[in-house]
Amino acid sequence: MTAESAVTTCFRHPKVESHVRCTRCDRYICPSCMREAAVGHQCPECVKEGTRSVRQARTAFGGRLSAVPLVTYVLIGLNVLAYLAELARPSLVDRFGMLGAGLQDSDGAHYLWQYPYDSSVHAEGLAGGQWERLLTGAFLHLPPTEGIGVLHIVMNMASLWTVGRIVEAQLGRARYLALYLLSALGGSVLELLIAPDELSVGASGAIFGLGAAYWVMGRRLGHDMQAVNRYMTDLLLWLVISAGMTSWQGHLGGLLAGGAVTLAYAYAPRDGRRVLVQAGVCVALSALLPALTWVKVSGLTA
């Protein structure tokens, strides 16, 4: 064998002479392809393969670990953008706020619901087929000139930032987003059932759902409940105090929906059935709430 034929080259860079083998696949690799390993060096392909085979760390409730509360950032951003849109176009509140049933004439004036109604007006709200209000209302807030004004969105976003980051870190992004949306939906549905002719806006229902999740997770994980109970007491106290200023129905509905979802997250069996149970409860609630909506709207328009 000649000296020239004995030269070994990198399998990824055939023109580069190499004398080091990958400890995993035993192929020659050059210095630019070497990756430090526990023993020796590995090639980039073997490093990627090893990364894929490593079991991903999970939270206590089955979600993927995440250091950045991305979903919370996005939700806050959407609420702020919606509020800026409201300031530029105030009519968005009337069009997309949560409303079960109302009447509107050709000049844009709004009237309380009655059925049947004459041809001079038309139905608006869920009774008028605007089912998107079930969720869009949870991203709108009171205009600066009404009620508590800009304080409404400031308080809600501060609460979302405070508790949302904690809940997202414990649940993972997918479970957290499902919890938030189902809590918002639960708040809207209870508003529809109890006060269908009242227009309401705000992320409070979803935030009350996060508060319920914070309490359930604290109990499940065996945390010191003193701080958790104090937060929950403040939340319930605000539900009572704000009854005259905001929609207590939305608060209570979000609280109940968020609690139900988190109970499924927290107490699902920790085996192969966990994801199935958690997803099953979310799907069941996603079906139950629209079904209740349909029954109520059918009653209003019957």
Image (cartoon, grey):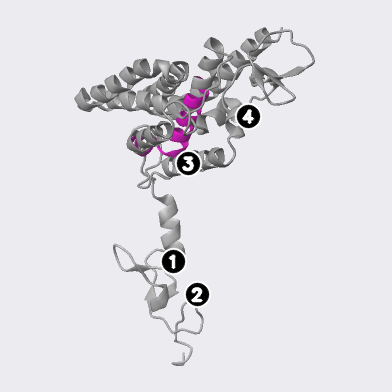
**Res. 287 in view:** yes
Residue at image location 42% in from the left, 40% down from the top: 72
Q: According to the image, label 3 marks what residue? A: 80
Magenta span includes 31: no
Residue at image location 62% in from the left, 11% down from the top: 296
Magenta segment boundaries in residue numbering: 166-186
Asked whether disc 4 touches disc 3, contact meaning CB atoms under 8 Å apart, the reply is no
Residue 38 x/y as whole percent: 29, 62
What separation in Å lies between label 2 and label 1 (alpha carbons)?
10 Å
**Res. 273 in view:** no
What separation in Å lies between label 4 and label 3 (alpha carbons)?
18 Å
Name the mark nearer the viewer: 4 or 1: 4
Q: Residues within 10 Å of mark 4 (few under 14, many from 20)?
A: some
Give the residue type at disc 1. Answer: Pro
Which part of the image, by quadrant, shows the C terminus? top right
Residue 300 x/y as whole percent: 66, 9
User: How many marks are shown on the rendered structure?
Assistant: 4
Mark closest to the chain's N terminus, 2 or 3:
2
Asked whether disc 2 touches disc 1, contact meaning CB atoms under 8 Å apart, the reply is yes
Secondary element under disc 4, as helix, strand or loop, is helix
Q: In this image, 73 relative to 110: left or right? A: left
Q: Which is more toward the observer, 280 or 55?
A: 280
Q: According to the image, label 2 marks what residue? A: 12
Secondary element under disc 2, as helix, strand or loop, is loop
Q: Residues within 10 Å of mark 3 (few under 14, many from 20)?
A: some
The label shown at residue 44 is 1
Name the mark nearer the viewer: 2 or 4: 4
Residue 54 x/y as whole percent: 39, 50
User: Relative to 78, is 281 above or below?
Assistant: above
Q: In this image, 205 relative to 222: left or right? A: right
Give the residue type at disc 3. Answer: Val
What separation in Å lies between label 1 and label 3 (alpha carbons)?
43 Å
